Structures are given as C-alpha cells and as structure tokens.
Image (tube, rainbow, N blue to C red):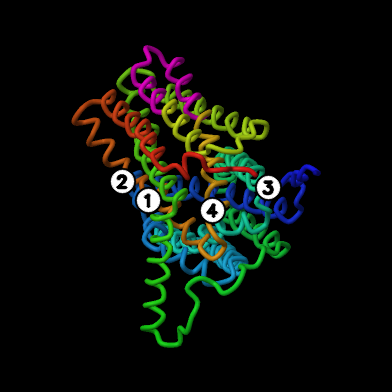
Amino acid sequence: MTARARPRPAIREPAFLRYLIGQSISLAGNQVWYVALSWSAVRLASPGLAGVLLMLSSMPRLLLMLFGGVVADRFDIRRLMIGSDILRTLVTAAAALIALARPGIALLAVLALVFGVVDAVFQPSAGAMEPRLLSPGQYADGAVLSTLTARLALAAGAPLGGVVLAAGGLGPALLVDAATFAVSVATLLTVAPRPVAGERAGSGNTADPRSRTRFVWADLKAGLTFLIHHPVLGPMTLAFLLLNLGFIGPMNIGIAELASHRGWGSSGIGLMLAGFGVGAAVGGLLMVKWRIRRNAGAWIAALCVIEGVCLFAVAVAPGVALAATATSVIGLTLGPVNVLSTVLEQREAPDGLRGRVASIQLLISLGLIPMTYGATGLIIAAIGTTGAFALGGLLEVSVVATLAAPAYRRARVQD
C-alpha cells in the first residue's frame, strides 16, 4: 500500500503566488491611504475630524458586509474583485489629481465612503478566493503565507505612506494607492479560481425586485443558519467572538491607558506593540514547521488560555520590559490561532457559502473594534485598568467552553 503523496507547498502554485503578491501590494496601499487620510484630516481640520472620517470609512463596510457576502456567493468573485479594484483605481487617481490642485475635507469624505462601500463587497469575495486557488491539502501553507505577507504589508505600508506624504503630500500618496489597486487588477486577471460545483447557493429567478429582495434575505438567513448549526464553524465562530471581545480593547485602548498611568509614555506603547508584532510574526513562521493536523479546537482553546493569562500579566507587570514580553507571547499565540481558524473556515465552508461565512467572520473582527473601544473606556472608568485587562483575559480563557463541541474539539486541519 503506497503512502498518499503530500501536496506541493502553496508557494509553488503560480496562480496563488501571483494573487498573494497582488493583494499584499494592495494592502500596503491601503495603509498608505489610512496614513494619508488621518494626516490630511488633522492638517486640514482637527484630530476629531480625522476620527470622524475613519468612522465614515468603516460604517458602510460594517453595515453592508453581510450583504457583500451574499453578493460574493451569487456572482463571479474574480469579476467582483476586479471591478472593485478598477473602481478604486479610477476614483483614487481622479481624487489625486483634484488633491494636487485643491485638497479638502469633502474629497476625503467622498473617498472614505466609496472605499467603505466597495470593501463590503471586495473583502468577502477575497475571503472566498484564496481557498479556490488551492487544494485542501494546501490550505495550511496558504494560510501561513497569507498571514505573513499581510503582516509584512501592514508593516511596510504605514512608513511608506509617511515618506510619500512628507515628500509630496496628499496627491502623490493617493497616486501610490491607485497604483497598488492597479497592480491588484493586473494580478487578478491572471488567476482563475476553481468553479463552484453545481448551482450557486441562493440562485433563482430575480427578475422581480421584490423577488430579488426576498432572495437576498433568504441567502443571508441561509448563511447565518449554516454557520450557527455547523458542528465545527459554529463553535469556532463563538471562540473567535470571545477572543476578539477580550483582546481588542485592552491591546489598543488599554495599553495606552496603562502606559500613561505607569509613566511609560509613548515609547512604552511602542515597545509593547512592537513586542506583539514580533511575536505574531514568529508565531506565523512557527506554523511553517509546526504541522498541527488534528484537534484544532483544543489547540485554539489552549492558545487562548495562554493569551488570556498573558493579557492579565501585561496589566500587573512591574516594568515595561516585562509587559512587552507578555505582549510578545500574546502575539506568538495569536499567530497560530489565526492560521488554524483560517484553515478550518476554508476546509469546512462549501464554495457556495464562502462569501457569507467570510463576511460574518469579518464582521465579528471589524465590527467589534469601535464597540470594544468604547466599552473598554467605560470599563476602565468603572473598575480600573487592571480590572479591564483581567476581564479581557477571562473572556479569552472562557474559550475553553467551546470544547464541549466534540467535532470542533477534534477538528482536522490536515489529512
């Protein structure tokens, strides 16, 4: 009896590699845009308005994300992504020309709205694209590569934005952003995702507008029902929710308050965030060699417990060096958790539902950010910084409750 041949690494799939390069460059361009938006808003108006514009960019994405998942499952995801990036290329290039002549807040507000609406369709489509460029045996490699390249793009994009803004201002920064969208279009034109087997979920006669509306709501309900009742993805989504509820606020608002209270200053914030970033990168690299094949739910729960304990350790650390060490361990555990959850989502979601599953997961992560920021501020005011970190850590430790689902606890990552 011959052993089953191991699939070749995802990095050796030319279409996937081209796609990954294009999306990484586009993600770096997004960071250039966010730096340009916040810097220009502060320069043209006030820090408060910069926050409003960032909110203006996120609200359409959050409000429309679930419907974007329905669209991604109904139509050709490659065409949706190409159309989205062509629109963003043209709009951003036109905005750059306007900014060279007369930069203004109205221009930034329009761009923020356009990007928010387009992202609501683009991101669920992107979530459905990657697994359709790989075989199931390559999902783990692909998730590791995606995690690492995304972190590199985020790390490179913000400094690039700062350099371009310092050298030329808003107009050139927008031109750089437009160029990254054009690169994404060029790479997407060269890939062909695996077709969805059979009829698309939710397809049907949509000639009547009322019928179209009913089908949209039916598709959305079908996606939510699938996710809630799925023996693996349902508990994983709950774990993801608890993790984000516990993690986002303390690691953003919390460490700023902690650094201020302890007298560590902005350098202390930078050191803790740098530790987290290095830990996350190492955690992602670790997954290249650390081949977890089964019991994914148990591994996720164990890593979340370690993360929860370290989150509390950040708050009680006597010095910034120990606090940064704790954030490094948090990053180290979060890297594998992200890879494992991505692979489970790709393995368990059928092609016809990938857009809706991706949109729900994105909504949980992106939608919680403004909510947890506000809630963390109120919690710190009520029970103090240490109490807020302790509560966050407790939420992460409570992920162990998802182990009551045996299919999730024993879920396979690789065959």
Residue wearing tag 1:
367
Question: Where is residue 166 drawn, in percent x and y?
Answer: 56, 42
Q: CA distance from mark 3 to mark 2?
A: 35 Å
Q: Nearer the viewer, residue 162 or 114?
A: 114
Q: Amino acid at mark 1?
A: Gly
Q: CA distance from mark 4 to mark 3?
A: 14 Å
Secondary structure, mark 3, is: helix
User: Which tag is nearer the camera, tag 4 or tag 3?
Assistant: 4
Residue lying at 64% horizontally and 31% vertically, measured from the top left: 290
Q: Residue 1 — which label? A: none
Question: Where is residue 383 drawn, in percent x and y?
Answer: 20, 27
The residue lying furthest to the top in this view is 318
Instruction: Tell me if 269 is positioned left or right of 154 in this view.
Output: left
Residue wearing tag 3:
138
Residue wearing tag 2:
371
Q: Check contact, mark 2 vs mark 1: CB within 8 A.
A: yes
Q: Nearer the viewer, residue 252 or 9?
A: 9
Q: Which residues are magenta?
A: 308-331
Is 50 situated above or below 321? below
Secondary structure, mark 1, is: helix
Q: Quadrant of residue 117?
A: bottom left
Label whose residue precedes the other's in the sequence (4 or 3): 3
Residue wearing tag 4:
348
